[in-house]
Amino acid sequence: MHDNIREHMDVIGADGVHVGTVDHLDGNRIKLTKADAGSHKGHHHYISLGLVAGVEGDKVRLSANADVAVTFEEEA
């Protein structure tokens, strides 16, 4: 499933809310584009591949709601 994750895909929480956009895979994490860093602009954020529920078309669906998934992000 993780082999299907590509650059520029939308990352969507289980609640359907946009979390970010894939920059690329970095080990066992999805690196989000800097544009999706919210109040931390200029920094990349990461989401664990363990939160990925599936890949549907051009969207990466997470098993957690967007507000919960954001708490799992890590600054680079």
Image (cartoon, rainbow, N blue to C red):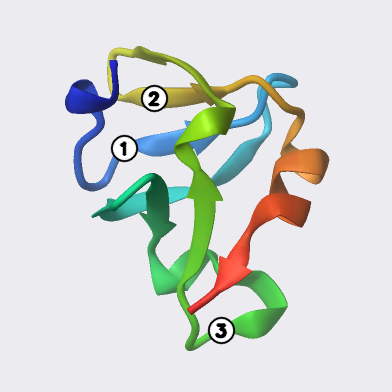
Q: Amino acid at mark 2?
A: Lys
**Secondary structure state at the residue bearing disc 1:** loop
Query: Which residue is labeled 1 in the image?
Result: 9
Q: If the image is split into quadrants, where does the N terminus sit?
A: top left
| Number of other residues with Cα within 10 Å of mark 2, as a class: few under 14, some 14 to 19, many 20 or more | some
Q: Amino acid at mark 3?
A: Lys
| Number of other residues with Cα within 10 Å of mark 3, as a class: few under 14, some 14 to 19, many 20 or more | few
Q: Earlier in the sequence, mark 1 or mark 2?
A: 1
The residue lying at 39 percent from left, 24 percent from top is 59
The residue lying at 70 percent from left, 52 percent from top is 72
Query: Which residue is labeled 3 in the image?
Result: 41
**Secondary structure state at the residue bearing disc 2:** strand
Dot 1 and dot 2 residues touching (CB under 8 Å):
yes
Side of 45 relative to 1 (left or right):
right
Query: Which residue is labeled 2 in the image?
Result: 59
| Number of other residues with Cα within 10 Å of mark 1, as a class: few under 14, some 14 to 19, many 20 or more | some
**Secondary structure state at the residue bearing disc 3:** loop
- State whether residue 64 is above or below residue 38: above
